[in-house]
Amino acid sequence: MKYTYIRYMDTNKIGLLEGTNEVLPKNSYVIISKDDCVDIAKVVGASNKLYEVKPSFFIRKATKQDISKMNHFSKISQSYMKIAKELSKQHNLSLKFIKAYTPIDGLKSYFFYTAETRIDFRQFVKDLAKAIKKRIEMRQIGTRDAVQMLGAVGMCGCKTCCSNFIDVFESVNLKDMEMQNLPMSPSKFTGPCGKLVCCMSFEKINYVIKYILPPEGTNICFENKEYTVSHIDPLTNLIVLISSEDRLNVNVMDLLPEGYEVAVKKCASCGGCCASSVEQQNVIFEEALA
């Protein structure tokens, strides 16, 4: 079975198109029923795999008139943004408007914003509704969602992953930097959203094996001699062991017990967040093999 995926024009997120078995051309437009409105969306392609993304119901293929209406409302929404920004200054609201969006049914306009604190904008909404003569819905989003919505260029020089193909954001923190042997300089790995770059999450699976190995700084016995684990590099399958007399580059496989694949699979499924000590690592391994 083929599943058709679409890109929502308001949030730039990926969604699942339900209600049709027809193979729709990539980059074509369709009319959908989403939440409490009728809107237009762009087809990004079809897949045999079912992903956990927000579904919308297929109504029909979009016509030239629908696309023209989409462009029309896009221009109108830009003028709404100017009005909203001016009114927010008058009301002294500490928020940042990201985008104004009006679905092609024209019944309501959505205003996406970011804010550090909770804001009472009831009077603002009333004044804005009077100014643009339309129903208003305010939607607060995070900084990652804002970059995904507007698009940006990442430190790699390419379009940010979130605005290109990511739909669900995975947690990325300083522990991931440590596990991936990166220098602890978060500013060097911060994206346009001000958060650690999402592409770090793509690499997690390559470093899962570190969760069942002795942590760096641990003393271990290897070939009847005591060594300290100095460095672990899963990408080259090497572990550096040092002692007062010697320094060895050992293959990771030489330190892994039989059946380690089961434990690695378990750590990959939970993120290995509990592997903060040798004792906990032993528990993980024993539970995985049970």
Image (tube, rainbow, N blue to C red):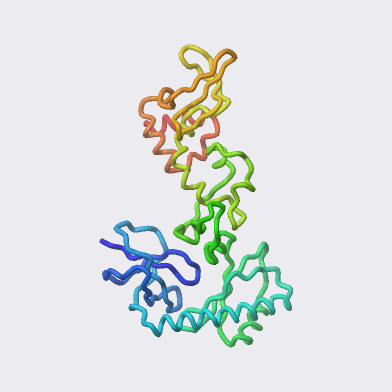
* In this view, 44 is above or below 246: below
Residue 145 spot, x, y in % from top left: 54, 62
Q: Is residue 243 left or right of residue 224?
A: right
Q: Name the foreground residue: 286 vs 228.
A: 228
Q: Is residue 255 left or right of residue 142?
A: left
Image quadrant containing the C terminus:
top left
Q: Residue at x 41, y 38 (%)?
A: 266
Q: Name the foreground residue: 276 vs 152.
A: 152
Quadrant hosting residue 24 = bottom left
Quadrant hosting residue 231 = top right
Q: Residue at x 67, y 68 (%)?
A: 95
Residue 41 spot, x, y in % from top left: 41, 73
Q: Name the foreground residue: 88 vs 206.
A: 206
Q: Name the foreground residue: 35 vs 227.
A: 227
Q: Is residue 32 left or right of residue 229?
A: left
Q: Residue at x 50, y 55 (%)?
A: 169
